[in-house]
């Protein structure tokens, strides 16, 4: 599970039929200090996150689990919206 | 998923028999302004994408989660053709 910031939305009408009702969000991965780390990816949004919000997302085959279909070509899904991050500075 | 642009096609007659009938497209990664980067993948097309289309690719074992690629030796699949991209900078 990783942190990311929602930076945009992807609109696609021609897509795999199992993806019909899902929102595709553009997310910028973050580290625990909320700084950009890595290149932006596209994730299915299952929690209704808006642009600018910090979210948690999961990758790989497990990204299909929160979706209401049993099979979908998805390798990243937003599973939570972060309220607060407390990190003990090492 | 990764944003990419279809730049070409791969033709291969001698290949794993599970791949017979699969359309293999070369997809280069692109950044937010559709600028093509060097990295690329060969992905199986399931949405009739053509050369020049901006597409989304799912990689890893998620790529086998479609009717066309189920139980096939595929680790990258084109699962959407992008119409529009809204990026709030």
Image: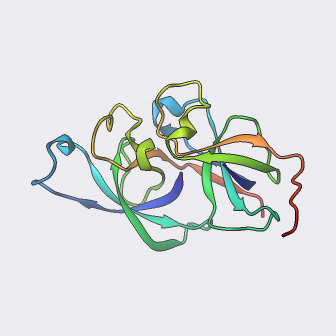
Q: Viewer-proximal residue, B62 or B7?
A: B62
Q: How many labels does the image show?
A: 0
Residue found farthest to the bottom: B38
Of A80 and A8, the residue lying toward us = A80
Residue A44, picture quadrant: top right
Give x and y (percent) for residue B35: 54, 72
Horizontal side of A64 relative to A36 (left or right) equals left
Q: Which residue is drawn at 21% across and 45% down?
A: B19
Left or right of B23 in this view: A28: right
- The residue at the point 73 percent across, 55 percent down is A4
Out of A39 and B81, give the one closest to the viewer: A39
Q: Looking at the picture, how far across and down is residue B70, in whole percent?
A: 33, 34
Is residue B47 shown above or below A87? above
> Please, which residue is most extreme toward the left here?
B14
User: In screen coordinates, is A76 left or right of B6?
Assistant: right
Residue under the point 59% across and 24% down = A68
| Placement of the C terminus of chain A among the 4 image quadrants | bottom right
Rendering colour mode: rainbow
- Measured as percent of width and height from the top left, residue A74 is found at 52, 41
User: Which residue is found at the position 78% from the left and 68% from the top?
Assistant: A35
Q: Is residue A56 left or right of residue B52?
A: right
Eyeballing the image, is B56 above or below B46? below
Q: In which image quadrant can residue B6 be found?
A: bottom left
């Amino acid at each position: 599970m990783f942190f990311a910031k929602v930076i945009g939305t992807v609109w696609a009408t021609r897509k795999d039929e199992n993806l019909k009702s899902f929102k595709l969000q553009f997310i910028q991965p973050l580290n625990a200090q909320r700084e950009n780390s890595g290149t932006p990816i596209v994730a299915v949004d299952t929690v209704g996150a808006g642009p600018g919000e910090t979210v948690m997302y999961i990758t790989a085959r497990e990204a299909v689990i929160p979706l209401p279909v049993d099979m979908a070509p998805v390798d990243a899904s937003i599973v939570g919206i972060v309220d607060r991050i407390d990190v003990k500075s090492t | 998923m990764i944003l990419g642009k279809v730049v070409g096609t791969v033709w291969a007659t001698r290949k794993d028999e599970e791949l017979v009938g699969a359309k293999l497209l070369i997809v280069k990664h692109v950044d937010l302004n559709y600028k093509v980067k060097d990295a690329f993948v060969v992905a199986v097309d399931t949405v009739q994408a053509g050369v020049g289309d901006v597409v989304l690719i799912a990689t890893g074992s998620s790529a086998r989660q479609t009717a066309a690629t189920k139980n096939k030796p595929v680790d990258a699949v084109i699962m959407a053709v992008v119409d529009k991209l809204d990026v709030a900078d």
